[in-house]
Amino acid sequence: MARTSLLHRSKQQPLAALGIVLLVIFLVCALFAPWLAPYDPARLDLTGRLMGPSAAHWFGTDELGRDILSRTIYGARISMIVAVSVVGLSLAVGIVAGCLSGFYGGVTDTILNIYVTNAFMSLPGILLAIAFVAFMGPGLFNVILALAISGWVGYARLVRGQVMAVKEREFVEAARALGASDLRVLCRHILPNIVQPLIVQGAIGMAGAVLAEATLSFLGLGVPPPAASWGSMLNDARSHLFDSPHLVFFPAMAVMLCVLSFNFIGDALRDYLDPRTKMETGI
């Protein structure tokens, strides 16, 4: 019965099923990269540089003779770490700021929502991240911190609006009448009722984090070499775009498919968690 229901839903939302399959593939590559990669991603072989796809090197080799398949597999590890870490950190900051702003209102809301949030939103997120990494130096931790600093604002705005809508509901008023503290009201009654849009926003935010990390690495502000990153692979391939296009094709496809998988899953979650969509599809 469960298998029939799962098959029915996958037929209704084929893009969601495709997104889940792609995400599972990237997660497997990230978790088991040392066992899946046929070569050491940092191993140099100058005698075999710029080789096209072959039986020995399925994705070919780069200008230093490194295996592109191995580097693409290891690149999934960096992208997954960045996606999960950035969204987790941004969500944590956004939930705290949004709850304080939406629950208490008044001066707290004015300071957090009008001044702090608008100040961050007035600056393009990617430019803020570039400035931060350029000042602190490249590295995985600095990339995660830079993207979280520029990405928490959207979650804070979302949480604020949801909290303001839920805090006036009857069950919240009943909890207050029974003497529940503000922290208990927030944690036990408000947050569980606003988690659905946060899940959807988090899934889509992971796609943005993967793309932003690739952008920073392409600009030389991401994870320093010899670590394999899809963005740095694209940067290295710029000078061989026409004579060795496979250097660009495989990491670019990896970025595109990873971003698409998160977007497909985010769209499917939004449709699944929307009661109106459930009624229309009969779920």
Image (cartoon, rainbow, N blue to C red):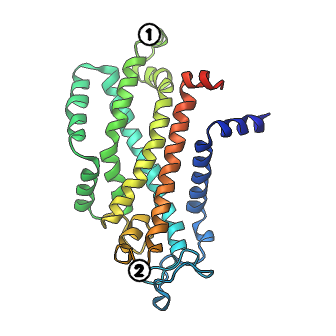
Left or right of residue 124: residue 235? right
Other-residue count near label 2 (Cα within 10 Å), few / some / many at <14 / 14–19 / ≥20: few
Position in image of residue 165 (x %, y %):
40, 18
Position in image of residue 103 (x %, y %):
35, 21
Q: For mark 2, what is the residue?
A: 243
Kind of residue indicated by mark 2 = Asp
* C-alpha span from label 1 to label 2: 68 Å
Going from N to C along the chain, the mark reached first, 1 or 2, is: 1
Q: Is residue 135 above or below residue 7?
A: below
Residue found at x 80% / y 33%: 1
Direction right: furthest residue: 1
Direction front: furthest residue: 242
Other-residue count near label 1 (Cα within 10 Å), few / some / many at <14 / 14–19 / ≥20: few
Does the image show residue 99? Answer: no
Position in image of residue 140 (x %, y %):
38, 61
Q: For mark 1, what is the residue?
A: 173
Residue found at x 45% / y 15%: 180
Does the image show residue 269? Answer: yes
